[in-house]
Amino acid sequence: MFVNLFFTFRDIKYRSTVAEMSSTVKPEVSELSIPVPWGEIRGRAWGPEHGRPVLCLHGWADNCGTFNTLIPLLPKECRYVAVDLAGHGLSSHRPAGVLYTFPANVADVRRIVDGLQWTTFTIIGHSMGGNIAALFSALYPEMVDALILLDAYGFLPTDQKEIPKVMRQGMDEMLQYEKKAEEKKRVYTYEKAAERLKAANPTLSERSVHTLLERGLVQGEGGFVFSRDLRINFKNIVRISLEQSLEIQSRIQAFVLVVLGDKGFGATTGPELYPRRFASKLLQGYHDRNHTVVTVAGDHHVHLNDPEVVAPLVSDFLRTKVFSQHLPA
């Protein structure tokens, strides 16, 4: 597969506010594009081309900009590639009639690493990206040497009795969407778009809002429109139970680091979405296999809002678990 590299911001104009907020990103950052059957997966790359490979996967409705503040604080000898998952950021939306599911995202990860010609690598995943990363690590254990979950448990189990209802809801949402006439995307001023993102994610700092909007907006007629596919809002119809999650978790062979925010996902989601028994069972599974689970002061986006809190933990984990396992090139 061909990987195309070109300069960041080459074909997209953003307001000066965004440019100022992204000025902290180091100049050696490059934009990349990986072809997929329906278009392209876009992203950014940091570090030496032949450095130790690290793939970074963002959370739901975010984009690869979520790693802009963290990656510059991590070990310089790695090649970090952060991608916009399908339907997010600047990546192509899935074809009409195709649902967004975790297995589809896992297949995309395989397409991405094949395009990068990586055979063994580390994955850093935030939230939804962590769930995709854990599932990939279980299905392709020989390819992942270390797995870092940022405010994610690696799986999103559903009560077995609720699975049929959730599956039907996701299908119905898609079918109803398809019956509507082509909807024109709402156009915003940059300021209004920032207000909307902040309202939807109140824990995001002002800087973080602008960082995510850098790839979360595209210029349209009369203003800006959000770049993400509206279909990512529909219920994910591929659901697994806690028991299935634990079985899949047991297939992970990589070293695992889980970094949770004390005001993050587990603390803020309601019991109907993520019962504490699910979280405790999954965390116990990591503990039983001698993996590392750490809680830090921060919210769901602590890695983006306060990267200085997370970076030392991730850096130490990479040095002790990844670098020490490989002989110098």
Image (cartoon, rainbow, N blue to C red):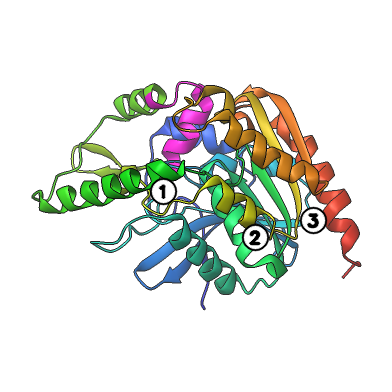
Number of marks in picture: 3
Residue 257, x across and y down, in percent: 74, 44
Query: Residue at left 60%, top 39%?
Result: 152
Left or right? Give the position of 113 relative to 38: right
Farthest-out residue, bottom = 1
Regarding residue 300, the answer to whether it shows in the image is no
CB under 8 Å between callouts 1 and 3? no
The residue closer to the viewer here, 203 or 285, is 285
Quarter of the rendering occupied by the C terminus: bottom right
Classed neighbour count for the residue bearing mark 3: other residues with Cα under 10 Å, few (<14), some (14–19), many (≥20): some
Q: Earlier in the sequence, mark 3 or mark 2?
A: 3
Query: Residue at left 30%, top 25%?
Result: 192
Q: Which residues are magenta?
A: 200-215
Residue 186, x across and y down, in percent: 20, 37
Q: Where does label 3 land, which residue?
A: 77
Query: Residue at left 51%, top 33%?
Result: 274
Q: CA distance from mark 1 to mark 3?
A: 27 Å
Q: Where does label 2 land, which residue?
A: 137
The amino acid sitting under disc 3 is Glu
Q: CA distance from mark 2 to mark 1?
A: 24 Å
Q: Where does label 1 land, which residue?
A: 89
The amino acid sitting under disc 1 is Gly
Q: Is residue 213 magenta?
A: yes
Regarding residue 41, the answer to whether it shows in the image is yes
Query: Residue at left 90%, top 57%?
Result: 324
Provide the major secondary structure of the magenta segment: helix
Q: What is the secondary structure assignment of the residue under circle 2?
A: helix
The amino acid sitting under disc 2 is Ser
Q: What is the secondary structure assignment of the residue under circle 1?
A: loop
